[in-house]
Amino acid sequence: MKQSKHHHHHHHHQQQDQYVRFFICLHHHHHHHQQQDHYVRFFICFITLFLSLPLTSSALSLRDRRYTPGTTLNNICLGRGNPAYWQFMIPALLSLDTYHDTLDRLGYVEGDLIVNTTEMFCGIGTIALNTTAETIANMVHLLDDGLVVRDNSLGLLRLGTLLLFTHRDVYSDGYCGLALGMPHADHSKIRPFMDFLLGTGDATSPWTNTTGFWNLMDIQAAAETFLEGRTSITVGRVALNFFLIEFHEKILGITITEEEANEFQTFAELFLGASILPYVPGVPLLLRRRGAVYVDMYIEAFTNGLANGRIPSNVLAEEDVTLAAVSIMTGVLFALSPALGGVTRAVVGVYLNNVGDTNSKLDWSSHVDLGRAIMEAVRVYPPVMGVTYVDGAIRVAGLVGYSGYDKTVFGENAKNYSILYDTVEDYRERMISWADTALPVEGKPETSHVCPARSFSFNMLLGFLSALDVESWMEGPDGKPTVKPLGTGPFFWDEFTIVKK
């Protein structure tokens, strides 16, 4: 793939990129200057509130905040000139510093749905695993019956729509948002294609690859080649570069370089940061154009795949190619990328710090033990917070990430990393981190909302970490990596560097 088009946007708008990076730091959770950031964030929120006060009177009473399905959530492409945009974004901005205390207020008791109108997700949810499992299982049936809708969210994070790609008219019913919350009819068109590409296992064997596009040993061999000769790596970024390269090559049939993968990461960071903030002059056009480059690349790949038989016509209709391309773009940007990089950092950080005396409990060269380490990392350092939908005037949050802290399931020390079970299967039977209970309506496999990359993501992590061989590395010049809680949880690892022993 030619790089010039990507590089033109990256270098020509470097100043704007740096501007957006400044705003990203305002909400980034892993900063080193929290006190100063709080003052800056307060100032930004205050100015935004002051400028938009006439438009947001109904939005400022957070306790009474309710949604109007079909308007601010779904069918309005929000922009700076639209009052609904400010009504939508101001509560999110004002709650940036409060949402991380969720664990203090969510109920541990099964069935205990606590109203959290001051949270960024402004909805109801519970930390109780069994109730959450039931909530997302029921969501599938409610969606299929047309009784609820998904909203434009990333996990629990409400997003604006100002920065969407130029291909923003591909959804039905006028929906304007990320593909993660697309209308049920669109989801049903794309889900068979997602399952075909990623090979998600069925309900009885979810870790089984059901396509011929990838397998664990091929991933591990590719990772060994990728890491060969490296004596120092920035863990999360290098790991994600590998994941992006493998995903594009193995799943999409597209070859990208490490430089292009790194550039994709930069774009993802900018897009995510700008998606939760008010209008920044110049940035929407810049990011839309850069996103369109990737979407067009996927459109070409899928069109060619249909023509040469790599993609069967029964899993993707020609008229749905653009919808599929936008959906893949959303998945890579907002689900696959942050999840895989974050879990890799967590596992390596656990090893370097011997968290929970893990090094005496595991054989790090064993696929079985490494799989256990990965599953425990997903439980304690959740890459996905939740799955949301709108039921009438209430936004419901299925807190699949927070469910890993349910003391009734994982014990009194549920918030601490400690290898709890003997096999990956033992973890899988208890965890719902991949929305595992959002199984399809009987006879309608296209209605499934289980993470389509459930099997692929786990095996990518296992293959890469096996090739990395954590015992052959030590902390870099900045010392051991650190893990930080967001208030009372959850916890995330800062980026760090390791060097060869």
Image: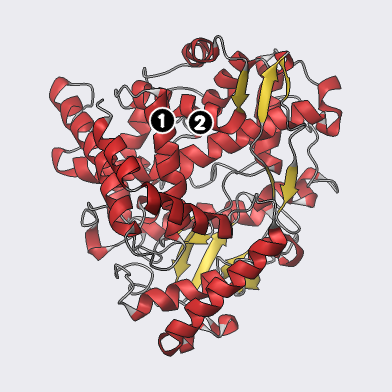
Kindly identify the residue that appears in the image at 17 percent across and 38 percent down. Answer: 317
Q: Circle 1 sits on which residue?
A: 261
Q: CA distance from mark 2 to mark 1?
A: 8 Å
Q: How is the image coloured?
A: secondary structure
The residue under the point 35% across, 36% down is 194
Q: Are marks 2 and 1 in contact (CB under 8 Å)?
A: yes
Q: Is residue 437 left or right of residue 321?
A: right
Circle nearer the N terminus (2, 1): 2
Towards the viewer: 195 or 477: 477
Secondary structure at numbered mark 2: helix
The image shows residue 414 at horizontal and vertical percentages of 79, 46
The residue identified by callout 2 is: 240
Judging depth in this view, the residue of 218 and 187 nearest the camera is: 218
Q: What residue sits 53% from the left and 45% below the top? A: 435
Secondary element type, mark 1 = helix
> Could you tell me which residue is drawn at 42 percent across and 58 percent down?
275
Question: Where residue 360 sits in the image (x, y, percent)?
Answer: 86, 21
Residue type marked 2? Leu
Residue 496 image position (x, y, % from top left):
66, 33
In this rendering, the count of numbered labels is: 2
Residue 99 visible, this angle: yes
